[in-house]
Structure formats: structure tokens, C-alpha cells
Image (cartoon, rainbow, N blue to C red):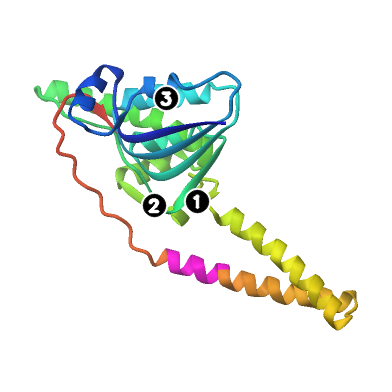
């Protein structure tokens, strides 16, 4: 399985030398596409604030076209980086992860005619982004448009509850470990007490209830965690940002 990192700003290939010279962490389409081998499974880690809409779209398309399984792990994903994440066959997010979606934006100048035309273009671009979210979440276009209008931030549980990710990293490992421990404990209990099958079943049931209570408590604690506040962009360069 090939491991690929998508970190920092997502930029066009033509901008890479400039960002590298300034020591600004970045990922361009070439950084990803040049590592893809036909038929090889991919594990991609995303820790990106987003960036250029067209560059992110190129990465998304290349991944969606890949002919092998893609697993995506999200540490932090905002803007166009969240669209790239939608290309995964399996998408997980870190328990401490953040996931943010918003509208496409651009810095430009011109008279009212140019601005009116640009507004239509931006809405069309939003619609294309929505299709990527819709395919995974099964939310309506209206729901997704509202979330983007509000610049919505999700913690790990929120991203999972809203269908943007399939699960939270490490949870499956913990559950499998618990089940193995549970079966072992029940078997030992049955051996020590010479219990019959009914007694063994009751022991398992009690431990399952205890595990369920633990999971509920963890989820309640996670919902109380504060979310990060968005940082206002100060980059005034031209180009569609997401």
C-alpha cells in the first residue's frame, strides 16, 4: 500500500517552486499524481487548510479515477482539502480532527458588471463542490449549500454524524480489542465458576452493557469539546480559493 501525504496549502504545480523557496508547506497535483501506481492501494493522510480550487479538483479527479482502494485519514481538512477527502473509498478522521466547508471565494477588481458575472460563476463553482459532498453524505443540495454559506466547522463526531467520514480513527481497533478481551473474560469466568451457558451469556451481557456505557460517556465528552475558530485569510493573490 502506497502512503501519500497531503499537507499545507494546496497549490498549482506552477506555484510549487515559489512556495518551496519560501519554505511554505504545500502540496500540488504533481506531488500526488506522480506517486500513484496503477492497481496499487493508497493510504492518504490529509493535514491541509485548503487552497486553490482547480489544483484540488485535479487531485480529487485523479484519485476518483484510480483503479484500487483508497483509504484517507484526516488530521485536519478545510476548504478544497475536504473535497479531496471525498475521493476515498474509506474516509476516517482523527479523534482530534477538524473538518470545515465553506463557499468558493476569489479576490479581484472591476465594475458592477464584472462583479455580477463573477457572482454567477462563484455560485456555479459552489454547485460543483456540492456534488462531491452529496455523493458521500446523501444530503440534499439545499442542506449542503446552507452549511457552506455558514462556513461550518465539524469536530470528529460531527463529521461522522453528518456523513462526511465513515468513522473515527482508532475506534475500530479499540472495539475489536474489547471484544477479544470480553470473550476471554467470559470464558475464564465460566471455567472458574463451572458456570453453564446461561451464566456465561449473562456475564457477556453485563460486560457489553458496561462497554456501551463507556462509549456513551466518551461521546458525551467529545461533544463538549470546543471547536477551532476559523482564521480569516489574508492572501490577496488572484485565483479561486476554497
Which stretch is magenta? 215-222
- Image spot of residue 147 (x, y percent): 36, 46
Identify residue for label 3.
32
Q: Mark 1 and mark 2 in contact (Cβ < 8 Å)?
A: no
Q: Quick check: 182 above or below 95?
A: below
- Pick the residue in front: 193 or 26: 193
Identify residue for label 2.
154
* C-alpha gap between disc 2 and disc 1: 9 Å
Q: Residue at x 10, y 24 (%)?
A: 109
Q: Nearer the viewer, mark 1 or mark 3?
A: 3
Query: Which one is earlier in the sequence, the residue at label 2 or at label 1?
Result: 2
Q: Residue at x 87, y 77 (%)?
A: 198
* C-alpha gap between disc 1 and disc 3: 26 Å
- Image spot of residue 75 (x, y percent): 40, 46
Query: Which one is earlier in the sequence, the residue at label 2 or at label 3?
Result: 3
Can the viewer see residue 4? yes
Give the quarter of the figure containing the C terminus: top left
- Dot 3 lies on which element? helix
Identify residue for label 1.
160
User: Is 112 left, or right, of 151 in this rendering?
Assistant: left
Query: Which one is earlier in the sequence, the residue at label 1 or at label 3?
Result: 3
Magenta stretch: residue 60 in it?
Answer: no
Magenta stretch: residue 220 in it?
Answer: yes
Give the quarter of the figure containing the N terminus: top right
Q: Residue at x 30, y 43 (%)?
A: 149
Q: Residues within 10 Å of mark 2 (few under 14, many from 20)?
A: some
Image quarter of residue 236: top left
* C-alpha gap between disc 2 and disc 3: 26 Å
Assign the magenta stretch its main secondary structure: helix
Amino acid at each position: 500500500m502506497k502512503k501519500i501525504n497531503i499537507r499545507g496549502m494546496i497549490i498549482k504545480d506552477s506555484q510549487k517552486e515559489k512556495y518551496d523557496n519560501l519554505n511554505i508547506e504545500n502540496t500540488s497535483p504533481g506531488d500526488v499524481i506522480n506517486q500513484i501506481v496503477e492497481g496499487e492501494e493508497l493510504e492518504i493522510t490529509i493535514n491541509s487548510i485548503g487552497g486553490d480550487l482547480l489544483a484540488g479538483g485535479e487531485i480529487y479527479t485523479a484519485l476518483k479515477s484510480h483503479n484500487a482502494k483508497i483509504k484517507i485519514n484526516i488530521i485536519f481538512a478545510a476548504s478544497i482539502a475536504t473535497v479531496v477527502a471525498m475521493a476515498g473509498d474509506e474516509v476516517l478522521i482523527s479523534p482530534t480532527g477538524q473538518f470545515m466547508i465553506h463557499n468558493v471565494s476569489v479576490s479581484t477588481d472591476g465594475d458592477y458588471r464584472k462583479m455580477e458575472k463573477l457572482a454567477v460563476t462563484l455560485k456555479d463553482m459552489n454547485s460543483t463542490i456540492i456534488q462531491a459532498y452529496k455523493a458521500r453524505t446523501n444530503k440534499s443540495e439545499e442542506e449542503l449549500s446552507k452549511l457552506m454559506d455558514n462556513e461550518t466547522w465539524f469536530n470528529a463526531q460531527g463529521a461522522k454524524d453528518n456523513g462526511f467520514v465513515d468513522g473515527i480513527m482508532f475506534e475500530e481497533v479499540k472495539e475489536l480489542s474489547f471484544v477479544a478481551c470480553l470473550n476471554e473474560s467470559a470464558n475464564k469466568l465460566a471455567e472458574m465458576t463451572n458456570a453453564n451457558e446461561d451464566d456465561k451469556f449473562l456475564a457477556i451481557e453485563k460486560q457489553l452493557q458496561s462497554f456501551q456505557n463507556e462509549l456513551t460517556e466518551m461521546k458525551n465528552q467529545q461533544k463538549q469539546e470546543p471547536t477551532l475558530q476559523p482564521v480569516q485569510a489574508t492572501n490577496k493573490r488572484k485565483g479561486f480559493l476554497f
